[in-house]
C-alpha cells in the first residue's frame, strides 16, 4: 500500500503541457480532473489513516479512480495527437 497520492502529473509525466492546456480549454476535462483530485485525496487520506472507511469503500474509490484515469488517458491521447 502506497501512502503517496497519485496526482495526474504523476500519472501522465510526459504530458504536463497537454494536461495544462486541457485544464484551460476543456470543461469536461476540468470536471474529470477535479473529480479525480477529490477521489484521489479521499483514497490518500484513508490509506494514511487520517480518515476511516471500510475495505469495500476503499476498493470502490480505487475502481472509480481507475475509471477516471482511463477516461482522462483517452482525452490526453486525443489531445496529444491533435484530434481533440
Image: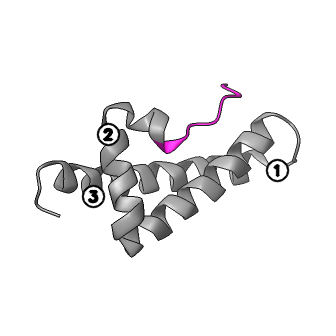
**Which quadrant: the C terminus?**
bottom left
Could you say which is closer to the camera, residue 53 or residue 21? 21
Q: Is residue 5 magenta?
A: yes
Q: Which residues are magenta?
A: 1-8
Q: CA distance from mark 1 to mark 2?
A: 33 Å
Mark 2 or 3 closer to N-term? 2
Mark 1 or 3 closer to N-term? 1
Q: CA distance from mark 1 to mark 3?
A: 31 Å
Do we see residue 33 in this rendering? yes
User: SS at mark 1?
Assistant: loop
Label 1 with label 3: CB-CB less than 8 Å: no
How crowded pointer 1 is (Cα within 10 Å; few <14, some 14-19, many 20+) is rated as some
Q: Which residue is mark 2?
A: 15
Residue shown at 56%/62% (left/top)?
A: 34
Going by the image, does 83 lie left or right of 35?
A: left
Q: How is the image coloured?
A: one colour
Which mark is drawn over residue 42?
Answer: none
Q: CA distance from mark 2 to mark 3?
A: 11 Å
Mark 1 or 2 closer to N-term? 2
User: SS at mark 2?
Assistant: helix
Could you say which is closer to the camera, residue 61 or residue 22? 22
Do we see residue 60 in this rendering? no
Label 1 with label 2: CB-CB less than 8 Å: no
Task: Give residue 24's position: percent from left, percent from top.
Answer: 40, 64
Residue shown at 46%/48% (left/top)?
A: 66
Q: Which residue is mark 1?
A: 53
Q: Which residue is mark 3?
A: 75
For marks 2 and 3, give the one nearer the viewer.
Answer: 2
**Which quadrant: the N terminus?**
top right
Amino acid at each position: 500500500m502506497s501512502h503517496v497520492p497519485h496526482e495526474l502529473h504523476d500519472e501522465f509525466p510526459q504530458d504536463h503541457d497537454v494536461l495544462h492546456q486541457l485544464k484551460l480549454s476543456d470543461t469536461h476535462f476540468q470536471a474529470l480532473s477535479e473529480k479525480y483530485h477529490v477521489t484521489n485525496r479521499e483514497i490518500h487520506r484513508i490509506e494514511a489513516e487520517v480518515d476511516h472507511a471500510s475495505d469495500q469503500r476503499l476498493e470502490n474509490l480505487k475502481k472509480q479512480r481507475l475509471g477516471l484515469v482511463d477516461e482522462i488517458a483517452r482525452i490526453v491521447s486525443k489531445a496529444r495527437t491533435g484530434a481533440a
